[in-house]
Image: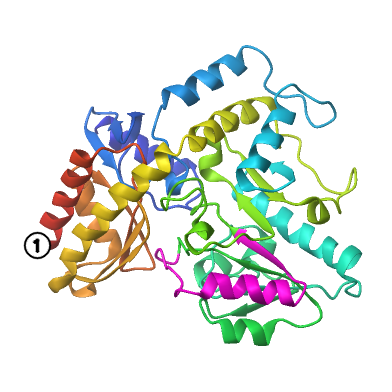
Amino acid sequence: MTASERSIAAAEAHSAHNYHPLPVVVASAEGAWMTDVEGRRYLDMLAGYSALNFGHSNRRLIDAAKAQLERVTLTSRAFHHDRFADFCTELAALCGKEMVLPMNTGAEAIETAVKTARKWGYRVKGVPDGQAKIVVADGNFHGRTTTIVSFSTDPEARADYGPYTPGFEIVPYGDLAALEAAVDEHTVAVLIEPIQGEAGVLVPPPGYLPGVRELTRARNVLFIADEIQSGLGRTGATFACEHEDVVPDMYVLGKALGGGVVPVSAVVADRDVLGVHRPGEHGSTFGGNPLACAVALEVIAMLRSGEYQRRATELGEHLHRELALLTGGDAVTAVRGRGLWAGVDINPARGTGREISERLMARGVLVKDTHGSTIRIAPPLVINKEDLDWGLEQLRAVLEG
C-alpha cells in the first residue's frame, strides 16, 4: 500500500464517516497549491469552503500566529487580554457597526445570531415570551447544530436529528412576496445568505437584497446576513451585501476571518442589538482568545488594503468569462456566481459532481461537489491567472473527455 492508501484506510477504520473526502492525503500547502504524502501537487480550487481566502501558509498570518504563540494563547473571557479590544474595534469598524461578539466556528456564530435576535425580540420589540419567529430561506446552509438543522431543507443535513427546534419559517430563496407574507408581528429576524454557497453558489435576483432590507426595516425586524462563506473578499467586495448597497442589521462572519490558521467567528451589529446581552447569558471559553484575535487582526488589516477584493473582482471576471464558454456544449447546463466563486452544473449524462471532482483530482485539481450534479469553484484569492487558467484547462479536458 502507498502512504496515501494506508492513511485513508486508517481514517476509514477509526474516524466517523460523517464526511466523504476525495482520496487525497495532503501533507503540505502553500498559496494555491497543496502537496500530498507522495509529493504530488494539486491546485486548490476550493480554499476550505472560503476559509482559505488568503491562501495556504500565508506568511503574514503565520507570522502573526507565531508571534502570539510566544506570548499568550488563551485567557478565557474571565479576564481581558491585550489583543481583544483591538480585534473588536477593528472588526466593528470594518463592518461599519458598533459591537462584536466573538465565537469560534460559523455554526456557533449562527447560534449566537439566533439567540441575539430572540433576546432582542423579547426585550426590545416586545414579542411575547416563547413566540419569537425567524424567517429563513429554502436551500439554506448555516451549519449543522441541532437548532440549525431544524430549519434546513437538505434531507442529508436534517434527517434523524429530531425533535427539531421550533420558531422558524422557511420561504423560497429570492421570493420577496413569500418573505413579506411570512413576516408577522412575532417575527424578530430574517436570516439569509446573500449568496447561497452550499446550495450551488446561488445568486439571488437583482433587487432581492434591497427588498429584504426595506421590508425588515419597515416591519421592525432584524436583517441577519450570513456572510460566513460569501464575506471577507470572496465575491470582490468585503461583504457580498455590498454589491447591492445593502447594510444588514447583523453580520455573521467566520471561515476566512481566521485565515485558515485558527477557527474564528463573530456576530457584528450595533449596540441596540448586541447590547441586549448581559454577563453570563451567552459565551465561549475560546471565543475571542488571544491567538484568534491576533490572526483575525492581520486578516482585517489585509482586507483594509483592498488588494484581495480587487483580485477577486478581476480574476473573478476572467473566471466567469471562461466558464460561460463551457455552457455552449452538452456538458455544462449552467454557471452561477460572483467574484472568485462559481457553481457549475454538470449534465448528469456526463457524470455526477463527485465523478467530475475525482477526474479533476486525477489531473491535479481539487474541487468539491454539492447536490449531486454541481461542482463549486472557489480558489484562494491569491491564485495567479496562469494557475487559474491551468485549472480551467483541466476542467475543459475532463468535460470533453
Left or right: residue 123 compared with residue 232: right
Quadrant, the N terminus: top left
224 part of magenta stretch:
yes
Secondary structure type for disc 1? helix
What amino acid type should be assigned to the residue bearing mark 1?
A: Glu
Quadrant location, the C terminus: bottom left
Instruction: Indicate yes or no whether the magenta region holds residue 38.
Output: no
User: Whole-percent x and y of residue 266?
Assistant: 66, 45
Give the residue number, with chain letter if any, for mark 1.
400
Q: Is residue 34 left or right of residue 109?
A: left
Pointer 1: residues within 10 angstroms few (<14), some, or many (20+)?
Answer: few
Figure disc tally: 1
Residue 170, relative to residue 2: is it above or below? Answer: below
Residue at 69%, 17% (x, y): give it: 72
Which x, y percent locates residue 40? 21, 32
Q: Could you tell me residue 207's position as x and y percent?
A: 50, 75
28 and 240: which is toward the camera = 240
Q: Position of residue 250 (x, y in %)?
A: 68, 57
Given residues 45 and 315, the one toward you in this image is 315
- Looking at the rendering, the stretch of residues picked out in magenta corresponds to 199-225
Residue at x 44%, y 67% (from the top left corner): 199
